Image (cartoon, rainbow, N blue to C red):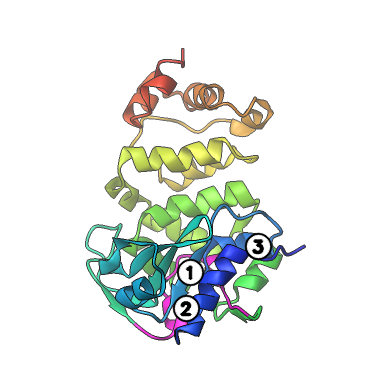
Amino acid sequence: MMKKPPEYALNILRRLENAGYGAYLVGGGVRDMLLGRRPKDWDVTTAALPEETASVFRSHKMTGAEFGTVTVKSGRRWCEVTTHRVDGEYLDSRKPSNVKFVKSVETDLARRDFTVNAIAYGLRGEFVDPYGGRNDLDAHILRTVRNPDVRFQEDALRMLRALRFSAELGFEIEENTRAAIARNARLVGNISNERVAVELRKILMSSRPEIISDCIELGVLSRYDIQNGDFRYIKRLPKEETVRWAAFAETSGGGREVLKALHLPKRIFNSVE
């Protein structure tokens, strides 16, 4: 059953619309709402330029104005509000070198990673869903917005995120999207070990830690000296970081060396035998 957005998030849309700017909730919050899950946070996309957003909210932080993002306070909660934009060239397989602000929410949705994250929700309960994200949610499928090779070459972290979403949501990765991960897996080498570890941790702590096997099979962990194994048993272990990292180290054959390579915090590394 779909949950409704909280009042503090709707109030942000209301205030922006009252000031003459279109605004929508977008991203993981909308996805989780449609799945009946409780979103951890909400993101807003708007036609307002960063300085215009700042003028609407007395309590705000210019946290990423060059990329269109202003963090505003509504009630007791802080929320990121980002201007509709298109991204410039990606030079490091991670972030765009620049952005261009636009007025259309549909244009903004075209830059997003997966169809299930490219759904916008308006103040009156309307959805903007140009890439069939709601259908993919119903089918429990993960696919990229437009060409998967382009999406992954822009931002290599999206490949790990696809696998993590598969683990957390119980979704299957669509065939063309999965094949593109295998073709572009080498680009994960441009992602820091710490960032890789963040995504792996979320997979290990999910109800489908066996997705680690997919990570290895598809090549996104090829820079580490590990092997594939039967990770299915990890789901039966307590959801404690040290326990699950220890199981990963043992099952992958990487031992403490792979944990060291991933730059895990000392409290985790030192707790693993």
Give amino acid for label 2.
Leu
Judged left or right of residue 213, residue 64 is left
Residue furthest to the right in view is: 1
**Residue 205 in view:** yes
Look at the numbered discs 1 and 3 and tell me whether their residues touch, using CB distance below 8 Å.
Answer: no
Q: Secondary structure at mark 3?
A: helix
Residue 11 colored magenta?
no
Q: Secondary structure at mark 1?
A: strand
Residue furthest to the top in view is: 273
Q: CA distance from mark 2 to mark 1?
A: 10 Å
Count residues near mark 1 (Cα–Cα under 10 Å), then give few for <14, some for 14-19, many for 20+. Answer: many
Look at the numbered discs 2 and 1 and tell me whether their residues touch, using CB distance below 8 Å.
Answer: yes
Give amino acid for label 1.
Val
The one of 247 and 47 positioned closer to us in this rendering: 47
Residue to which mark 3 is pinned: 33
The one of 219 and 38 positioned closer to us in this rendering: 38
Count residues near mark 3 (Cα–Cα under 10 Å), then give few for <14, some for 14-19, many for 20+. Answer: some
Residue to which mark 1 is pinned: 44
Extent of the magenta region? 102-123
Q: Residue at x 41, y 69 (%)?
A: 57
Q: Residue at x 59, y 32 (%)?
A: 231
Give amino acid for label 3.
Met
Q: Where does the image place residue 162, in percent across and percent down from the top left?
A: 50, 55
